[in-house]
């Protein structure tokens, strides 16, 4: 239809002008060639050994550097519009329904395989499958096994461009400049990682909007489109459902559950590659002064709180090649969608241990230094603040220990690891 063509044109313009118009991200092949060339030059200038260790996840920042020109951040207005676009995409109710159906299929298949049932139940039962799920066809036009793809068409279209935008901005954006592209891309990435933070709420529409025989004005129709709201009628009042974002606190628990397993699988490399870049760049945060320490620690907490034990277990199950058949189809579709930007499939979270340890020890070293420089008044002032804040603010010592435990589980540090 003309509406579909208009929507597609708008989406292509957004991709071309907003997401893909300022920097050229290297393909995986280009990044690997550059990596080998640099490593080869260094090794030949030292011991002449031409054996080059292949890159791992910890090298994501180096692999993300643009090839042909210095990094040029997009204008501030475009950065915010990209953020709004992501918020709109992840709050889509149809995507939520598709994810839950596909996640149920993943869990059924996993249980079947654990119980020794070898049949490939690659899709939800016909009665439960979402009608929007893709049914790809082969070259002969014959439908293959139905793949429970759980991203909407717009989200699928922009996924590789969002991936490149986030990894380029995190790798190249200035950290110590307020409202820089690094910090805005970081906020966009966090929203993308946690669609479960959107909850559907109901509100009453004004009576002026439901006048008999009159259509809503164009501005209202546009607002309904972008909110993706569903209107329902109850008695004489009219309601609409709308997505509301519940912003998590830095120390709050992640709301991730296995109902979102399919979403994680369909966006796997957005959970791993930007994380590796963040762990490396977070070492640049200022943890020394009181104000900067609190702000920097909160940023690290806001990222790491997302990676709770169930989420890390799902990621490790995938990267360790222990995923069920349905999850494997989602991964294959995700990597097909990323195309030439798909990273090597043997990258694991554990390869980031070195960067995680350096970050953790920097945070604790500066924390201990601050404590040693506090006088009796400062110490009592801190205790009073904690006392009157109640449960609103976590004791800093407890927060530090929780952070250490999160990092230890995330990158699989030894159980007997002790912070220096």
Image (tube, grey):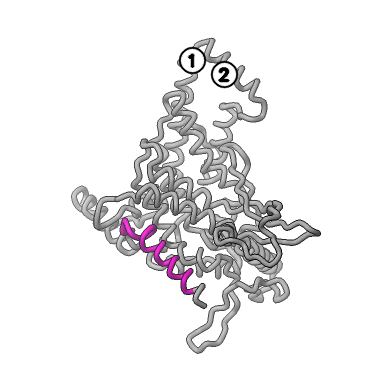
Q: Is 175 situated above or below 293? A: below
Specify whether 356 is left or right of 43: right
Q: Kindly indicate whether the residue at mark 1 contacts the one at mark 2 (C-beta within 8 angstroms).
A: yes
Residue 194: x and y, percent? 57, 51
Secondary structure mainly formed by the magenta segment: helix
Mark pair 2, 1: CA separation: 10 Å
Which label belongs to residue 374?
1
> Under tag 2, what secondary structure?
helix
In primary-sequence order, the first of circles 2 and 1 is 1
> Under tag 1, what secondary structure?
loop
Specify whether 168 is left or right of 37: right
Residue at image location 44% in from the left, 26% down from the top: 366
Residue 411: x and y, percent? 50, 46
Tell me where residue 387 sits by quadrant.
Answer: top right
Residue at image location 43% in from the left, 57% down from the top: 163
Mark 1 burial class by Cα count in 10 Å: few <14, some 14-19, many 20+: few
Residues 143 and 62: in front is: 143
Which residue lies most toward the left here? 45
Residue 86: x and y, percent? 50, 55
Say whether residue 110 is visible: no
Residues shaded magenta:
5-25
Residue at image location 41% in from the left, 50% down from the top: 79
Q: Magenta stretch containing residue 21, yes or no?
A: yes
Which label belongs to residue 382?
2
Q: Magenta stretch containing residue 284, yes or no?
A: no
Residues 109 and 418: in front is: 109
């Amino acid at each position: 239809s003309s509406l579909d063509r208009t929507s597609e044109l708008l989406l292509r313009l957004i991709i071309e002008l907003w997401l893909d118009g300022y920097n050229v991200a290297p393909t995986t092949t280009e990044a690997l060639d550059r990596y080998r060339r640099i490593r080869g030059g260094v090794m030949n200038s030292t011991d002449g050994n031409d054996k080059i260790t292949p890159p791992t996840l910890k090298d994501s920042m180096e692999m993300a550097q643009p090839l042909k020109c210095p990094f040029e951040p997009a204008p501030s207005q475009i950065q915010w519009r990209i953020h709004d676009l992501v918020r709109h995409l992840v709050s889509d109710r149809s995507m939520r329904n598709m994810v839950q159906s596909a996640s149920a299929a993943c869990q059924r298949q996993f249980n079947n395989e654990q119980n020794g049932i070898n049949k490939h139940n690659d899709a939800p039962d016909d009665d439960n499958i979402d009608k929007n799920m893709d049914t790809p066809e082969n070259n002969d036009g014959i439908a293959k096994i139905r793949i429970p793809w759980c991203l909407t068409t717009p989200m699928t279209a922009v996924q590789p461009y969002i991936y490149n935008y986030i990894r380029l901005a995190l790798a190249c954006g200035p950290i110590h400049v307020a409202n820089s592209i690094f910090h805005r891309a970081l906020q966009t990435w966090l929203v993308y990682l946690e669609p479960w933070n959107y909850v559907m709420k109901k509100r009453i529409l004004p009576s002026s909007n439901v006048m008999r025989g009159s259509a809503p004005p164009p501005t209202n129709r546009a607002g309904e489109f972008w909110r993706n709201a569903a209107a329902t009628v109850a008695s004489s009042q009219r309601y609409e459902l709308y997505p509301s974002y519940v912003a998590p606190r830095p120390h709050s628990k992640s709301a991730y559950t296995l109902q979102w397993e399919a979403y994680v699988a369909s966006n796997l490399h957005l959970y791993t590659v930007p994380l590796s870049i963040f762990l490396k760049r977070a070492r640049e945060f200022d943890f020394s002064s009181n104000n900067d320490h609190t702000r920097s620690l909160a940023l690290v907490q806001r990222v790491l709180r997302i990676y709770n034990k169930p989420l890390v277990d799902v990621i490790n199950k995938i990267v360790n090649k222990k995923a069920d058949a349905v999850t494997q189809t989602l991964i294959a579709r995700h990597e097909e969608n990323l195309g030439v930007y798909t990273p090597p499939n043997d990258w694991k979270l554990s390869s980031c241990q070195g960067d995680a340890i350096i970050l953790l020890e920097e945070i604790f070293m500066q924390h201990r230094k601050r404590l040693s420089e506090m006088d009796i008044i400062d110490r009592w002032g801190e205790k009073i603040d904690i006392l009157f804040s109640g449960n609103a603010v976590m004791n800093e010592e407890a927060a530090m220990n929780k952070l250490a435990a999160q990092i230890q589980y995330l990158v699989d540090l030894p159980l007997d690891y002790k912070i220096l």
